């Protein structure tokens, strides 16, 4: 009984410990949520037009595009809508005001989704953060921005993922050649910029790239440079292997001939020493001959490695610990040119917590990913069936026209033949008549 009671008591203590640990974890989670700040969220609900302003840029030239509330032609949830560009060959510009914020001393997270369900051919799908006052009705490609991030596609050569940062009024593109997604499904793009000037780029919640503003943008001169005037020291030993100084040539090595008489050769029976001379076996390579003697190669005990130009501190480098700090952000917008319209933008998020952004991506894009693939595949089946039907009808129409052309040709040919035959008979009749006269 006592042993059973002890077992029950131990189980109770273990259960209390587990419950306490769970409470601590939940408290930490909610504490993190309370500390992190969600600056801007846009799911493009039915009242989205009350927050977003379509620019009049290019309107007077007839080149301004527009946005419609749509989930696109294939979607996991037709009621989960974004804003879709239309019509083709237009400039698109739209923006929304956000509560002014600064990323000084905190992480900046910018995230959104885009679906190129059209064969875009050539066009952008990037997002911009804007600082200061912006006349939203005049928002254009010339409007200064603090950050531009997202895909840009043109033909088969350009599949670029832009990350352009503004520093002291000048725009600096990332030096890396980053590629974006090019299929017709929704993809989530996330840019994270931290107070230590490090960054991460996520595509579909997976890190695509990371680095530092100090090295991946030509904003500041590099911290360290190669000492171009440096020369390799004369006594630098970069020989990885050397001849064995203790090696000695074996006695009699030079007396070994390169060729020897073939020990298996036999004098032919027809050989006549008187007429042919003394028979000698042919010479063959000597298997004991190893070529000219060389010392054995060994590792050089004094090897210092391949000499490299040393790095030194760059005298022109002047650190700016606030290199990552943007001007206070006041607006977010999309400003793109598209040859073929149809891009769907959705789920814009600005916050300072990368983990929260990941959670949002999973709750929006993640839960619909497989269903959207299925909807796309079904739409592709319908499209292929329509194309096959149209091709069949085109073939039938072509055959019908060819038959009609052939019938007309035969009819015309037959009529010409009848006329020619009729004229010939008529002429022969009069010839006979004249002969009789």
Image (cartoon, grey):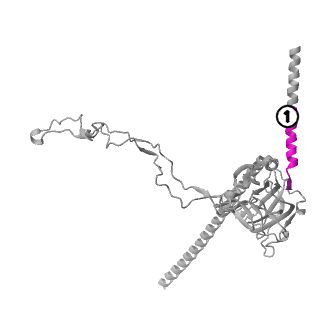
**Quadrant housing residue 66:** bottom right
In reply to whether residue 277 is colored magenta, the answer given is no
The image shows residue 82 at horizontal and vertical percentages of 83, 57
The main secondary structure of the magenta stretch is: helix
The residue that label 1 is drawn on is 21
Q: Is residue 105 visible?
A: yes
Tell me what residue is drawn at x 49 percent, y 82 percent.
Answer: 431
In reply to whether residue 28 is colored magenta, the answer given is yes
- Is 373 or 366 nearer to us in this picture? 366
**Quadrant housing residue 86:** bottom right
Tell me what residue is drawn at x 86 percent, y 24 percent.
Answer: 11
- Is 42 or 431 nearer to us in this picture? 42
Query: Which region of the structure is painted magenta?
Result: 18-41
The image shows residue 93 at horizontal and vertical percentages of 80, 67
Q: Is residue 182 visible?
A: no
Label 1: state its secondary structure.
Answer: helix
Query: Would you say 68 lies left or right of 390 here?
Result: right
Residue 92 drawn above or below residue 280? below
């Amino acid at each position: 009984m006592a042993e059973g009671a002890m077992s029950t008591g131990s189980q109770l203590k273990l259960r209390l410990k587990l419950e306490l640990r769970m409470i601590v974890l939940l408290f930490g989670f909610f504490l993190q949520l309370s500390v992190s700040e969600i600056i801007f969220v846009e799911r493009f609900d039915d009242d989205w037009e009350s927050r977003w302003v379509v620019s009049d840029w290019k309107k007077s030239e007839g080149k301004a595009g527009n946005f419609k509330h749509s989930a696109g032609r294939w979607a996991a949830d037709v009621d989960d809508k974004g804003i879709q560009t239309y019509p083709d060959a237009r400039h698109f510009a739209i923006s929304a005001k956000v509560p002014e914020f600064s990323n000084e001393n905190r992480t900046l997270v910018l995230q959104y989704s885009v679906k190129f369900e059209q064969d875009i051919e050539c066009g952008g799908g990037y997002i911009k953060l804007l600082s200061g006052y912006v006349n939203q009705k005049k928002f254009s490609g010339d409007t200064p921005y603090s950050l531009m991030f997202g895909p840009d596609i043109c033909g088969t050569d350009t599949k670029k993922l832009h990350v352009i940062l503004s520093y002291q009024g000048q725009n600096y593109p990332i030096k890396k050649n980053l590629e974006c997604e090019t299929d017709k499904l929704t993809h989530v793009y996330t840019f994270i910029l931290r107070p230590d000037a490090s960054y991460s780029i996520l595509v579909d919640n997976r890190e695509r790239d990371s680095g530092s503003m100090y090295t991946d943008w030509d904003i500041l001169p590099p911290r360290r440079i190669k000492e171009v005037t440096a020369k390799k020291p004369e006594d630098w030993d970069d020989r990885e292997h050397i001849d064995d100084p203790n090696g000695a040539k074996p006695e009699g090595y030079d007396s070994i001939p390169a060729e020897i008489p073939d020990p298996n050769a036999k004098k032919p029976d027809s050989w006549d020493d008187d007429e042919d001379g003394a028979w000698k076996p042919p010479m063959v390579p000597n298997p004991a001959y190893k070529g000219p003697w060389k010392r054995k190669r060994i590792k050089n005990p004094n090897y210092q490695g391949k000499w490299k130009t040393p790095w030194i501190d760059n005298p022109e480098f002047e650190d700016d610990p606030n290199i990552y700090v943007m001007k206070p952000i006041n607006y977010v917008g999309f400003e793109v040119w598209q040859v073929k319209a149809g891009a769907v933008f959705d789920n814009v998020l600005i916050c300072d917590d990368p983990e929260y952004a990941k959670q949002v991506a999973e709750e929006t894009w993640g839960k619909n990913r497989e269903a959207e693939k299925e909807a796309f595949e079904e739409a592709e089946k319908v499209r292929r069936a329509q194309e096959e039907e149209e091709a069949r009808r085109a073939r039938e129409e072509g055959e019908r026209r060819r038959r009609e052309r052939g019938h007309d040709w035969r009819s015309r040919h037959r009529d010409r033949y009848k006329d020619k035959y009729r004229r010939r008979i008529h002429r022969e009749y009069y010839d006979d008549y004249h002969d009789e006269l």
